[in-house]
Every structure is written in structure tokens, then in C-alpha cells.
Image (cartoon, rainbow, N blue to C red):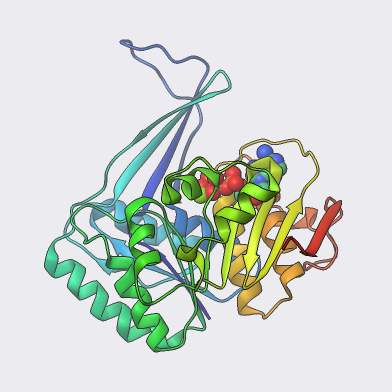
Amino acid sequence: MILTVTMNPSVDIAYHLDSFVTDAVNRAGETHKTPGGKGLNVTRVLSQLGEHVVASGLLGGKTGEFLELELDKAKIKHSFYKVSGDTRNCIAVLHEGQQTEILEPGPEISEREAREFMNYFAKIVPDYKIVAISGSLPKGMPVDYYSQMIEHCVKNEVPVVLDCSGDALLEVLKGKSKPRAIKPNIDELSQILGIEVGEDFSSLKSALSKDIFEEIEWVIVSLGSNGGFAKHGDKYYKVNIPDISVVNPVGSGDSMVAGITAALHNRQTDENLLKMANSLGMLNAQEKQTGRVNLSNYLNDHMLQVNFFTRFYPKLNLR
Ligand SMILES: Nc1ncnc2c1ncn2[C@@H]1O[C@H](COP(=O)(O)OP(=O)(O)OP(=O)(O)O)[C@@H](O)[C@H]1O
Ligand SMILES: [Mg+2]
């Protein structure tokens, strides 16, 4: 069974408008409210893949109850820890082909709540085969919180796939207990290293060869329409993908994380892991909804043959 962690989930509200006028009343047409937050996107895709997955993290207030009801409706199991603050709303106004977003910061977490969730997490971790942790930490939580969570996983020999950025990620990279895989995009990679990393082969290889990544088994850099670049131990891979027609690429990284997690869980080969991760990213980019894929476009019912995968270079020897 797979555990996903979303520490700052949201109710994502999408308002569709013909036009958006500031300093005036705008009336929404179609309105959608869905569970949001990167970890919940990962959860949705894992559930679509038929994996046994449980979503965890922090929830609070009526918005938190709404999320639980929506997860129930989608038949997704959940086991959130309740906090006193309200789960946030994140609003996207879709108008004239544009997307204007307003993101609430989410509740401030008290020291006691942070401590209690950690105890709870430590208790449930041994029940799972793999954990996927995604997204930012809410206000009030120590920056090394993910490091502490990973320590509990490592102690129980439960591998972790981590997708976060900035200081929370740096703390993990500097820490003793390492995740099995991380999935930065190129901006997040550049930010961690404090340099602008180019998308060419040698820049990426030299970036991933840095000591800071040495003990992380899988570093998978997602490159949007350029596919991905990965390091697995001492092997490096470049995944090239063909041009596809894109509808909404938001959440493609989360779909990729779902692919990485499912492939690790099912002990797939490197090649299959990378194919699955990129295919799910692409499939998400072809849908309107964030963190949803149309698996009927995924040929051969699992992952071995993906028709839009044209060029794949395993085990490039780049020394
Ligand atoms: N425009 C695109 N065309 C084709 N494939 C795409 C496109 N955008 C994303 N993908 C696929 O999805 C993967 C992940 O996308 P991306 O690099 O944009 O992740 P991200 O920046 O972490 O996104 P997010 O954080 O919004 O989920 C890519 O490696 C690629 O396989
Ligand atoms: Mg991302």
C-alpha cells in the first residue's frame, strides 16, 4: 500500500468567465470545486492507476470536511490529521485563455499539532510499502519537518519519493536520512544549486553529479515539453518526448511523481519507470483537469508500450 502526504492541501475552485474585469463585478459561469494540493494530485493519479493508496496530511474546518467528502466520493482512502485552522481555498479564474490565480496561504500549524502529526505519521509508516511526500509545508512548521518524517521512513525501511522545493528540500538534501527519489523541475534544481542549470545534456549531468545528490538513489529532473533527465546511482538517462497538443500542463509534475512512486512500488526497471513517469506527465498535460489522466490513451493497459514515446536513450555512457 502507498501513503501520500499533503501537508497544505486546498479546495481548488475554478471559475470560468467569458471576460475578467478588475474593479467590477464578475459573474462566474461554470464553477468547479475539487480537492487540491500536489499530494492529492499524486493520490488521484495513483488511484487511477489502480494502486492501493491512502492520502494523509493535515486538514481542518469545513473546507477540510469538504475534501474528505470529495475523496470519499472518488473512493480514495484517507487518513488525515485534523488541525484547528481551516484548510485553504485556492482560486483560479479562467478567462479568455488566461488563468488568474489567488492562493490562500493555509492555516498556521501550532507546535503541538506539528508534534502530534509526526507521532501519528511515525505510527502509521510501518503499514506502508512506499511514501510520496509532495508540496510545501504550511506556516508554523519547522523547515526540517520533511527530514524528520523521512527519518521515520528510513528507520522502517520505507522508501520515500519527495517533491518539494526551496529550503524544505535543501534541508532534506543536507540531512542524514535520504529519500529514495526526488523530482525537481529545472527551476527547482537551479534554485537548490544557486546556479542557472541549462537544459542541455552536459549541464544537467554536471548538476546531478554534485555531492549534494550523491546519496539520493534517483534524481529525476522534469523538463516540461523537453521530457526529463535522470540519475539513478551512477547511471544517467535522458528521456526525449515528442510534441503533443497540450491543454493544461499544471500537475504534470505531480502525475510524474505518481508514476515514479507506482514504478518503484512495483519494482519496475529503470526504463519502465522513466517511461511511466513521463507518459503520465504527458497524459496530464493533455487534460483540462489538474492531476487527472486519461488512461485509455495509455496503450497496452500498463506501461510497456507507450505509442507516443519516440526516442528513449537508456544508460547513456557520459563519462
Ligand atoms: N508541454 C508539455 N508537453 C509534453 N509533455 C509535457 C509538457 N509539460 C509537461 N510534460 C510532461 O510532464 C512532465 C512533468 O512536467 P513539468 O516538468 O512541467 O513538471 P512540474 O514543473 O513539476 O509541474 P507541476 O509542479 O505543475 O506538477 C515532463 O517531464 C513531461 O514528461
Ligand atoms: Mg512540480
Q: Residue furthest front?
A: 319
**Closer to the camera in the image, 290 or 241:** 241
Q: Is residue 258 visible?
A: yes
Q: Residue at x 86, y 51 (%)?
A: 310
Query: Residue 92 appears at what percent x and percent y?
Result: 44, 33
In the depicted structure, whether residue 265 falls above or below residue 298: below
Residue at image position (54%, 55%) is 254
Q: Quadrant of residue 24?
A: top left
Q: Quadrant of the C terminus?
A: bottom right
Residue at horizontal 36%, vertical 66%? 174
Going by the image, does 45 lie left or right of 11?
right
Q: Position of residue 295 (x, y in %)?
A: 73, 57
* 123 versus 247 height, above or below: below
Residue 284 in sight here: no
Q: Residue 147 occupies which quadrant of the picture?
A: bottom left
Rendered residue at 54%/58% (across/down): 183
